[in-house]
Amino acid sequence: MAPTPVRHLYVHVPFCSHKCEYCAFYSAPPSGDQVGRYVEALVNEMALVAPRCRPETVFFGGGTPSLLSIHHWETILEAMRRLGFLGASEFTVECNPATVSADKARLLRSAGVNRVSMGVQSLDAGLLERLGRVHSREQVFRSLEILRDAGFDNLSIDLMFAIPGQDMALWEATLDEALGLGTEHLSCYEVIYEDDTPLFEQLKAGEIDVDEELACAQYERLVERAQAAGFRQYEVANFARDARPGALPPRPLPEIPALACRHNVAYWRGLDFFGLGPSASEYVDGVRSRNRASTVLYTEQALRGHRAKEFAEALPPLARAGELAAFGLRMNAGWPFQAFHELTGFDLRDGWAADIASLADQGWAEVLPDRLRLTPQGLRFADEAARRMLRS
């Protein structure tokens, strides 16, 4: 019997023009012929997974995928065409507002890219500088115009809250402008102080403070304002519309908005996916693995015709079930008991009964006849709730 095709594909582009103050993802400014070698290596790695990969969703993340030149994109897209990777129902590319051009937008759209996720983070000039972003607020508006002109009708923007120096008035002003942009999707993340980032070092040195009360208030205001603007929250940080402004609603996906990011939903629901590029993670056939977080080592191995795996592990069934319980609870729909049992072989109501009772007693979760889901308060503390669902 032929193995089941893998329907989801992630590609990591490790290049950025400048490393942001908060970023802990693997990325670095390109040097020399590094980008060309990376593209060649990526094409090789695509060919290695092609026999199993029939993507319904594709996501190019980074780093800054839009930093790649038109020539590099042409090489990648031609390889994807040759290998049967084009034609996905959802094909997302992350973009930085400073690296969007009309020619590049038209090329991507003509090749089947139908969704762009733009890293805006803030629309305040001072906060953009504080975060180390290379784009201006004016470039955000111009880039969205370019993408619309190129035919993109599914656009997402990323915003950040609880930024040092961002009071409620600044957050309200950003929400006013961001919600007026007419995008189909919104992702909003609280600033996290990751090890080995400039922001973390500033926190350790006492140069900045964390105001948890303000962060909670900003999150609550986000949920309120996004819903009032026609978005539906479907995950802790993600909001989407059920239809494009002015259009008739398409047939919705079960339990989530029609314009939700289907690729990310695949992660949260524990579906198999390939991960290509330096530092990319993947989960296939019960094995979780990650590529080396080094563009040099990645390209060396991929150019020799090998996948550049740093590690691979098959989790015991209970540990994997606990991980999936944690991921899935980030979604507003929670975990339907039947779906969880079909995927993992475990019943949430048995193996996690004490944890569920504790979450419910705190007001963080509710048990419905068909599912477990977090309450609005529980979603605010989803990371803590998720930790309780993990199993060793």
Image: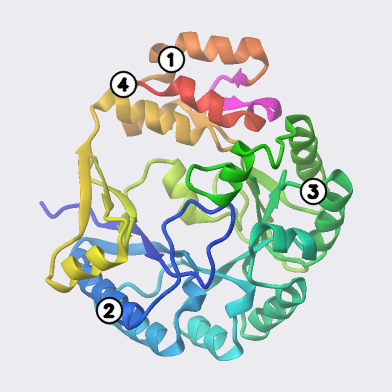
Query: Is 88 placed above or below 139 here?
Result: above
Residue 25 screen position, x and y as percent: 46, 54
Does dot 3 land on a helix, a strand or a loop? loop
Task: Give the CA distance from mark 1 to mark 4.
Answer: 13 Å
| Neighbourhood count class around disc 2 (C-alpha, 10 Å): few under 14, some 14–19, many 20 upward | some
Does dot 4 land on a helix, a strand or a loop? loop
Task: Give the CA distance from mark 3 to mark 1.
Answer: 39 Å
Task: Give the CA distance from mark 2 to mark 1.
Answer: 48 Å
In front: label 3 or label 1: 3
Residue for badge 3: 166
Does dot 2 land on a helix, a strand or a loop? helix
* Foreground residue among 230 and 93: 93
In terms of sequence position, does the residue under pointer 3 or pointer 1 come before the other?
A: 3
Which amino acid, by three-letter code, is at mark 3? Gln
Residue for badge 2: 37
Which amino acid, by three-letter code, is at mark 4? Ser
